[in-house]
Image (spheres, coloured by chain):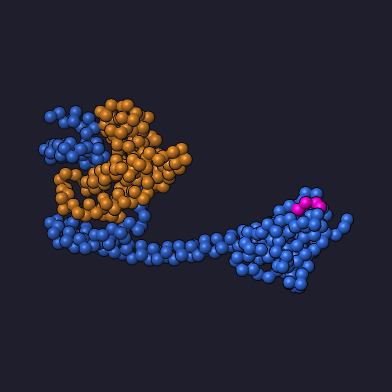
Amino acid sequence: MYDNYSGALYGVVLRVVRNEDIAQEVLQDAFLKIWDRIASYDEIKGRLFTWMLHLTRNLAIDRTRSKEMNKNRKTDDLANLVHKVENQEKFEMTVDALGMREVIERLPAEQKFVIEHLYLKGYTQSELADEFQIPLGTVKTRTRLALKELRTILKED
Amino acid sequence: MNLQEYIASGILEAYALGELTEAERKAVELNTKQYPELFEELKRIEETNETILLNLAVQPNALLKTKLTTAISPDGKTILLNSSSSIWKYAVAASVAVTLGMGYLAYDYRAKWKNSEVTLNNLIAQNRLVAQDYNRVHLKLDRIENDLKIIDNPDFKKIVMTGTSNAPQALASVYWNNQTKEVFLSVQNLRALSNENQYQLWAIVNGKPVDAGVFDGTTAGLIKMKTADKEATTFAVTIEPKGGSTSPTLQTMQVAGNVGKG
């Protein structure tokens, strides 16, 4: 289970918290929780991965809202920003994702924008809606169309 | 309920991505339980989401797995026994086995890593020592170069002060520029003093001793002293209480030398 999913979940956490040390901590907490609660997972509800993703992603988002991270964000100055941009590149490129990026490139612009922010930049749908002033309903329908399109493309490949 | 509208709203995608609140999530789960069409659609969406995220995976540090193994192995057994699903028993057992194997590899890796860390620290420490030595030599060289400039400068007169009857072996020299009045002192041989005393240099100007500064006998190289008026005819060194005196204690005179004519 760890071998199959730790990479995918770590990718999610890392894109949300943007700090490798914190991401490792969050992932560790997440797996401990998964162990703890695996008995409560119910196959009827959906796939195991989705269940693990919910748990892990919530921990990551909670962490960004904690005091510690807020403090980190406040001390971001210009020098850090450069470093941050570099890191951002690293996070997005160390993944075995070049193929995936090409696939995303093929989406229509509006859908590509949504997918890039949700999957590559660690945004939530509501953050995306707030920051770019798109109605949340629109973000949701665009996500749906994009995923439908991606499903078709991925099947072709 | 209009299922097509429900699907088109994108709520199932939001569910798969983990965007929903606990209450919204429960509502979706109730609906998918009730309508097989929704359940099938959600499954397709979850599969796509999973494929994308697996493709975007980033491998965490291998040590994390070791940490997790140690954290869960005591409890792992209880989960194993209490679990109701046999598939899960098997999955947990397999995970534990794989984890233990990986744990050894991680341990081995950590040992090697630690080892190279020690080597690196040693190298860093050595490098620091070499750098300190270099700085020390560099400072010394700077000082010698400065001293040499004064000794080489024809404007500076060298006055050798030889030992008096108090200290026949004593020897010291003064380099004196009678235009700028600068005075430098070089100690060749003066005995060590107790902490209460210091040497004091005097310039004899118009027959009167004038203070030219105090010094410890141990300093190597040239020592910059106070200026001496160009009328000075003799330089002498006495032993005085620490900090110097206003007039010399003649009984303690160690060395003296006259300024040569011309």
Give the magenta-colored segment's residue range. Answer: B228-232
Q: Which chain is orange?
A: A
Q: Is residue A129 visible?
A: yes
Residue at image location 24% in from the left, 59% down from the top: B72
Position above or below: A81 against B209: above
Q: Is residue B36 left or right of residue A93?
A: left
- Magenta stretch, main secondary structure class: loop
List x then y, in percent, for residue B157: 81, 57
The color chain B is rendered in: blue
Compared with B10, A3 (above or below) is below
Residue B90, image x, y percentages: 20, 60
Please report the residue visible at 26 percent of the width from the left and 45 percent of the height from the top: A59
Which is nearer the eye, B149 or B68? B149
Give the number of callouts.
0
| Residue B59 magenta | no
Q: Quadrant of residue A54?
A: top left
Magenta stretch contains residue B231: yes
Q: Quadrant of the N terminus of chain B?
A: top left
Residue B48 versus residue B15: which sits nearer the camera?
B15
Instruction: Please determine whether, in this image, residue B103 is positioned above or below residue B31.
Output: below
Query: In the rendered view of the protein, which quadrant contains the C terminus of chain B?
Result: bottom right
Q: Does B69 sit above or below residue A136?
A: below
Instruction: Tell me which corner region of the image, top left, top right, bottom left or bottom right, holds residue B148.
Output: bottom right
Residue drawn at 56 percent across, 63 percent down: B129
